[in-house]
Amino acid sequence: MEIFPDWQVIFDSLTPTALFSFSALVSAAFVLFRRYREWAIKLTAIFLVSTIALIANNTLVYIASLFIIATLFTEGDYLLTLIAIIRGDKGWLDLQKMIKGVSNPPQKDETSRKRSAMEYKILNTLWTKQVNYYADYSKLWGFTINVGAIDYLEFREAADRLLEEGLISRGDQGMYFLTGKGIKFCADNYTTFSNPDDQYWPEEKIKEENLTVAIEGAEKL
């Protein structure tokens, strides 16, 4: 009497649908681990969408599935721009040009201009969290906001101005981080920022005990 299962029989009986479903369950388990969460969510979604597509066995569902999977690896702005091109929405395209400064590139000295409240909000958020979590700059703390957020356009416009100054950088996943220049700027000027409490997640205050380490570290950058 055999105790162990016949794995060959099991593998031979696996259908693509069953394989994708099982893969979705495995990748979903990794969502529990913060380190792998981002990619685990994407893989789980891919496997689930693929399973649905296989079950449906329909060309339109296949096309829709490919589009959904593409959105998992493409920034929302790019997809919205693509939709605007297909629809011929000139207003959206003009708005994107204005935000990126293509239509009217800045002519004045950026360091001397008056900053907007949103620019300070971004700098306040990045500086506070950098000091609280990585005061020694062993890592950079970053964030972004959802494309559907009510203040998203204002956020992007302010972020683009800070990018032009070199105070922040933008990662592959659309996350914003302080640059070396931005860290030095915040270390030297954070006390003059307008309304320090105006930031994302304002309930988390800056840790005074970490400030000395952060400021001294900024001088060495």
Image (cartoon, grey):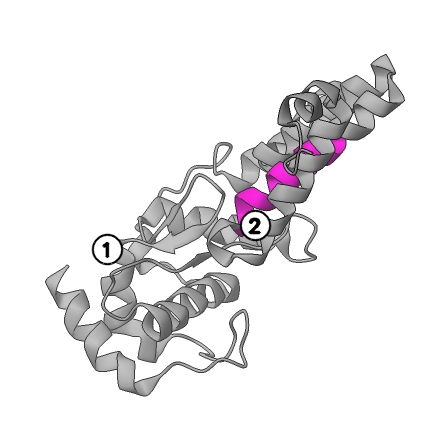
Q: How many marks?
A: 2
**Residue 30, disc:** 2
Q: Residue at x 44, y 79 (%)?
A: 196
Residue 80 in view in this figure: no
Magenta-highlighted residues: 37-49
Tell me if 133 is positioned left or right of 96 in this view: left
Q: Residue at x 73, y 21 (%)?
A: 16
Instruction: Return the residue nearer the eye: 8 or 221.
Output: 8
| Residue 27 falls in image quadrant | top right
| Residue 92 falls in image quadrant | top right
Q: Residue at x 31, y 59 (%)?
A: 112
Q: Residue at x 52, y 63 (%)?
A: 118
Q: Amino acid at mark 1?
A: Gly
Q: Residue furthest bottom?
A: 209
Residue 78 in view in this figure: yes
Please say if the residues under marks 1 and 2 sit with CB atoms less than 8 Å apart.
no
Is residue 168 depicted above or below 208 in this figure?
A: above
Instruction: Return the residue nearer the eye: 208 or 106.
Output: 208
Q: Residue beneath label 1, please?
A: 180
Q: Position of residue 104 (x, y in %)?
A: 48, 37
- Mark 1 → mark 2, Cα distance in angstroms: 34 Å
Instruction: Return the residue nearer the eye: 163 or 210.
Output: 210
Q: Quadrant of the N terminus?
A: top right
Q: Position of residue 24 (x, y in %)?
A: 68, 39
Label 1 sits on a secondary structure element that is helix
**Residue 147, disc:** none
Q: Position of residue 98 (x, y in %)?
A: 55, 38
Q: Amino acid at mark 2?
A: Phe
**Crowd around label 1: few <14 · some 14–19 · many ≥20 (10 Å):** some
Is residue 79 depicted above or below 129 in this figure?
A: above
Tell me if 65 is positioned left or right of 36 in this view: right
